[in-house]
Image (spheres, rainbow, N blue to C red):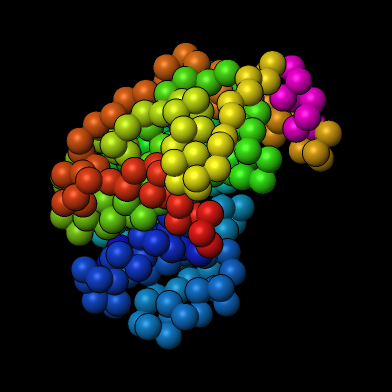
């Protein structure tokens, strides 16, 4: 039995679909906050159980019988994030899970400029301390984040963002394929994987060129001072912690934390990962 948390989210849902292409539905289970949102999976024979990271007993029940657990990282930051992960890891131990796989991130380190990478590093420490077999999937930075940053530029033609550095933007579909491959070929990685990245690290100057090529429209790149970007983000209604989190992505990118490009993802999925231009074209066409 393979149990997946966050199975109604972007990465979790895609991973479940890839698993169902590889194994029978009775070998797949999901732990979700709202089982109604996973009713279609239940209709296909997937075991659906309610599990909340704020309710340890529900997670123990949801994880019951798991040979492997895919712990999809929470959409939280700081202590709230790590506490939720600790709850899930403790529940996995209590439920007798055989192996835990965790969706970490390239650049995970205690001294990262990006809060989420510090949270990932602390979660990897918790996994290491369990004594269980574990794998940290060091996923490339999600290309969906870059597309969010580009949403305004899509209409204005001006990519007005803080100074950055090259980032190995990586597609959810490729990462889901790789995750399913690892889950169905147990023991391929012990501890952190190499960075699971797209084929190139790009800064937003290069992204502007790619957007121009993809659309046939000119795109410019304007560097916004960090302080001005933070104020703009706050003015758009974001809470201060979210504004700081967004800014820290650029700080970390300038520090070279997301520049690694590695062949491991391509080896896992048996093809070259999608290039950023293709991901942008697909998203903007939709």
Q: Position of residue 206 (x, y in %)?
A: 44, 28
Q: Is residue 85 above or below residue 192?
A: below
- Corner quadrant of residue 44: bottom left
Q: Position of residue 139 (x, y in %)?
A: 36, 39
Q: Is residue 162 left or right of residue 118?
A: right
Decide which of 68, 235 is in the foreground and name it: 235
Q: Is residue 259 left or right of residue 264?
A: right
Give the residue displayed 36% in from the left and 28% down from the top.
201
- Corner quadrant of residue 137: top left
Bounds of the magenta segment: 227-234
Residue 9, visible in the rendered structure:
no
Give the residue displayed 61% in from the left and 45% down from the top.
154
Q: Is residue 237 above or below residue 115?
A: below
Seen as rendered, the residue at the extreme bottom is 43
Residue 16, visible in the rendered structure:
yes
Decide which of 74, 253 is in the foreground and name it: 253
Q: Position of residue 21 (x, y in %)?
A: 25, 71
């Amino acid at each position: 039995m393979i149990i997946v948390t966050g199975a109604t989210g972007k990465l979790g849902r895609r991973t479940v679909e890839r698993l169902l292409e590889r194994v029978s539905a009775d070998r797949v289970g999901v732990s979700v906050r709202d089982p109604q949102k996973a009713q279609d999976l239940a209709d296909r024979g997937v075991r659906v159980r309610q599990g909340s990271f704020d309710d340890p007993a529900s997670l123990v029940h949801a994880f019951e019988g798991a040979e492997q657990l895919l712990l999809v990282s929470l959409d939280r930051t700081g202590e709230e994030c790590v506490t939720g992960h600790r709850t899930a890891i403790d529940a996995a131990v209590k439920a007798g899970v055989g192996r835990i796989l965790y969706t970490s991130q390239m650049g995970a380190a205690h001294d990262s400029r990006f809060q989420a990478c510090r949270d990932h590093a602390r979660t990897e420490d918790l996994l290491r301390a369990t004594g269980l077999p574990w794998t940290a999937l060091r996923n490339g930075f999600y290309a969906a984040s870059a597309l969010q940053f580009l949403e305004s530029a899509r209409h204005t033609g001006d990519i007005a963002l803080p100074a950055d550095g090259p980032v190995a933007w990586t597609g959810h579909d490729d990462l889901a394929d790789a995750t399913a491959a690892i889950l169905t070929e147990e023991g391929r990685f012990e501890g952190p994987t190499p960075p699971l990245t797209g084929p190139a690290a790009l800064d937003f100057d290069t992204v502007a060129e790619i957007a121009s090529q993809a659309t046939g429209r000119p795109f410019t790149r304007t560097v916004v001072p960090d302080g001005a970007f933070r104020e703009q983000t706050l003015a758009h209604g974001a809470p201060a912690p979210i504004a700081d989190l967004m800014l820290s992505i650029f700080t970390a990118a300038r520090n070279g934390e997301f520049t690694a490009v590695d062949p491991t993802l391509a080896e896992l999925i048996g093809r070259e990962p999608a290039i950023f231009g293709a991901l942008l074209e697909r998203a903007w066409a939709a």
